[in-house]
Amino acid sequence: MNGIPVLHVEADSIARGWEESLVALHRDGAVVRTQYDREGDAASRDCTMILTIRDPLAEPMIHKDFPGGPVELQEYVMEVCEGIKDHLVRDPADPADTRWDYTYHQRLFAYETPPGGPVDQVEAMCRALAEVPYTRRAQAVTWRVGADNDCFDPPCLQSLWCRVTEGEGGRRLSMNARFRSNDAYRAAFMNIFALVELQRRMAERIARLSGEPLGVGRYCHMADSYHIYGSNAREFETRFLGALGKRTFEERTMRYDAFREMMEEARPDILAKAARMGR
């Protein structure tokens, strides 16, 4: 390969797609150092990944081997889709403020533009697609030139792009998500799950605005650098890869509909935890 390899994975569900993308990355990815390596760390495994999930709401949706559990997954969905941690974003005018530089929710739903104030890019996308379903202009960006070039921890998610198409199964909303950098093992599953939930909510919003039914179509996850850090290599090989030969796919995954009620019941505790953060 003349440069970083570009790997393509296509699967029927989130759980299977994430699993197969990690297998492909471990097998065919390049060996690359990172800016976060500590002395003694192995090099990372890295590639450019294009992961297409044909039916993002197909069960089983949840993979048991992502580093977390159902409540942590619910918390992350609420962080991305509802902004429960937006209060942790620092005041850029205060050099002594050491809170976060951004949240994805803040950049997507309240993108700061100097002339006119915050822009809800997601609502703008929904309105554009309700008016012209085939528009190519329905996108949202997170990167802020001038703020993020020198940021210690700049956004990994760069943009969302959506389009409505019609077929035998009716109207569907497709989503593309592009990441400049994506920790494939410790972050990508939660990223995908939360963005698919955002895709589902957007489909509902567009349907309300247009007065026409709209389902969830395919989701495409594109990462310029899709990587497994060398510091996580041993855990990944023993915990994740080790399970592939010991358990069936059904044993390695779980149905979201079996945990949805429990995850929803955790909302008050998650909101209370988020409110305490930063104090």
Image (cartoon, rainbow, N blue to C red):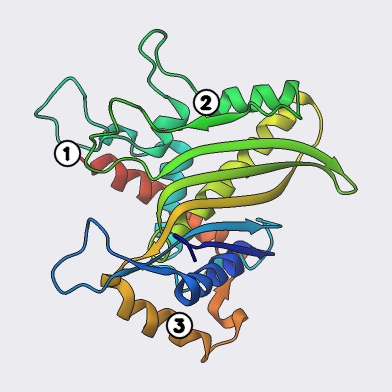
Q: Position of residue 106 (x, y in %)?
A: 39, 31
Q: Is residue 49 above or below residue 138?
A: below
Sequence-wise, which precedes: disc 2 or disc 3? 2
Q: Residues within 10 Å of mark 1 (few under 14, many from 20)?
A: few
The correct choice, above or below, for 63 with respect to 117 in the image is below
Q: Residue at x 46, y 37 (%)?
A: 82
Q: Earlier in the sequence, mark 1 or mark 2?
A: 2
The answer, for residue 255, to whether it is visible in the render is no
Quadrant of the rendered image containing residue 85: top left
Label 2 CA crowd tier, 10 Å (few <14, some 14–19, many 20+): many
Q: Please tell me which residue lies in front, 125 or 150.
A: 150
Q: Amino acid at mark 3?
A: Leu
Quarter of the figure with the C terminus: top left
Q: Which mark is residue 241?
A: 3
**Residue marked by disc 2:** 121
Residue at the farthest bottom position: 246
Q: Nearer the viewer, mark 1 or mark 2?
A: 2
Q: Is residue 37 visible?
A: yes
- Give how far apart the Cα atoms at labels 3 and 1 are: 40 Å
Query: Label 3's element?
Result: helix
Q: Are marks 1 and 2 in contact (CB under 8 Å)?
A: no
Q: Secondary structure at mark 2?
A: helix
Q: Residue at x 62, y 80 (%)?
A: 250
Label 3 Cα neighbours within 10 Å, binned few <14 / some 14-19 / many ≥20: some
What is the number of the mark on residue 73?
none
> What amino acid type is highlighted by mark number 1?
Arg
Disc 1 marks which residue?
Answer: 279
Which residue appears farthest toward the left when viewing the image? 96
